[in-house]
């Protein structure tokens, strides 16, 4: 069915194939270019950030985003090891061939920056608060393409990779949403509502997306500062 309504453009990104699906007759090469850009950016961020996630790394570029995005987890070492495992999976999956659907969601009943359709029903097993398997041991993830909102892809180069990491978190490792408590404001400054707990934060898709962005920013800002000689 989908093939009737969406056109597909296949391009190479860093040796992997990216398929960009756009609504037929409404597609443009500019959208393909920006999706490629977002994917490359997300990959670059993850490549930079993942090696920094170490329990003995006390640098503010890591610990500040950890406190902010993951709500001051009492056991920082345990939190960092969960975060590293989740982001490693997301990094691996975003490093493979990928299919991304771009559409305008402004007219939807619930406009979204992005989404992936959930399909799991029935029994599930939670591991560390995260849904991993059905009782039969079958792995669960969200079915189908990552969807990204066209206006974000086209206009918000900072937020598009965040949304991509967020949606990859839903698709590949069953991260969740917690409504306004779990969503950051559009500019990434603070949550839309108070009340997310640190336990919830470790399952919260937006926490991971913005964490990667914030660590990357702080880390690279630090590096680009001119050296001080004394
Ligand atoms: Zn979500």
Image (cartoon, rainbow, N blue to C red):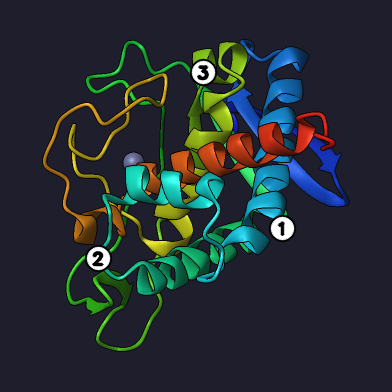
Mark 2, ligand 1, within 8 Å: the answer is: no
Q: On screen, 167 above or below 170? A: above
Query: Of helix, strand and loop, which one carries label 2?
Result: loop
Q: Which residue is mark 3?
A: 152
Indicate which disc, 2 or 1, sits on the residue closer to the N terminus: 2
Q: Position of residue 206 (x, y in %)?
A: 37, 41
- Identity of the residue furthest to the front in this view: 230
Q: Which residue is mark 2?
A: 74
Q: On screen, 229 above or below 83? A: above
Q: Which quarter shows the C terminus?
A: top right
Classify mark 3: residues with Cα within 10 Å, few (<14), some (14-19) or many (20+): many
Indicate which disc, 1 or 3, sits on the residue closer to the N terminus: 1
Classify mark 1: residues with Cα within 10 Å, few (<14), some (14-19) or many (20+): some
Q: Mark 2–mark 1 contact, CB under 8 Å?
A: no
Q: For the point 66% across and 49% down, which residue is it?
A: 98
Classify mark 2: residues with Cα within 10 Å, few (<14), some (14-19) or many (20+): few
Q: Position of residue 174 (x, y in %)?
A: 36, 60
Q: For the point 63% across and 44% down, which residue is it?
A: 99
**Nearer to us: label 2 or label 1:** 2
Residue 47 visible here: yes
In three-dimensional space, the C-alpha distance between marks 1 and 3, rounded to whole angstroms, equals: 23 Å
Q: Mark 3–mark 2 contact, CB under 8 Å?
A: no
Q: Quadrant of ligand 1?
A: top left
Q: Which residue is mark 1?
A: 96
**Nearer to us: label 3 or label 2:** 2
Q: Quadrant of residue 73?
A: bottom left
């Amino acid at each position: 069915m989908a093939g009737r309504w969406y056109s597909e453009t296949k391009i190479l990104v860093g040796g992997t194939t990216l398929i960009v699906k756009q609504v037929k007759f409404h597609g443009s090469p500019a959208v393909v270019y920006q999706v490629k850009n977002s994917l490359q950016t997300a990959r670059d961020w993850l490549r930079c950030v993942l090696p920094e996630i170490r329990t003995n790394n006390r640098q503010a570029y890591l610990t500040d985003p950890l406190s902010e995005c993951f709500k001051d987890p009492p056991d920082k070492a345990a939190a960092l090891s969960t975060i590293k495992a989740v982001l490693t999976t997301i990094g691996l999956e975003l490093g493979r061939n990928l299919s991304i659907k771009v559409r305008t969601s402004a007219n939807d009943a619930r406009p979204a920056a992005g989404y992936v359709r959930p399909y799991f029903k029935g029994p599930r097993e939670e591991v560390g608060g995260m849904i991993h398997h059905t009782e039969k041991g079958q792995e669960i993830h969200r079915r189908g393409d990552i969807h990204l909102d066209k206006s974000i892809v086209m206009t918000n180069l900072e937020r598009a990779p965040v949304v991509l990491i967020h949606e990859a978190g839903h698709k590949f490792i069953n991260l969740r949403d917690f409504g306004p408590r779990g969503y950051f404001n559009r500019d990434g400054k603070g949550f839309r509502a108070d009340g997310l707990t640190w336990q919830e934060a470790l399952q919260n898709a937006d926490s991971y997306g913005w964490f990667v962005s914030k660590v990357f920013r702080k880390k690279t800002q630090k590096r680009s500062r001119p050296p001080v000689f004394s």
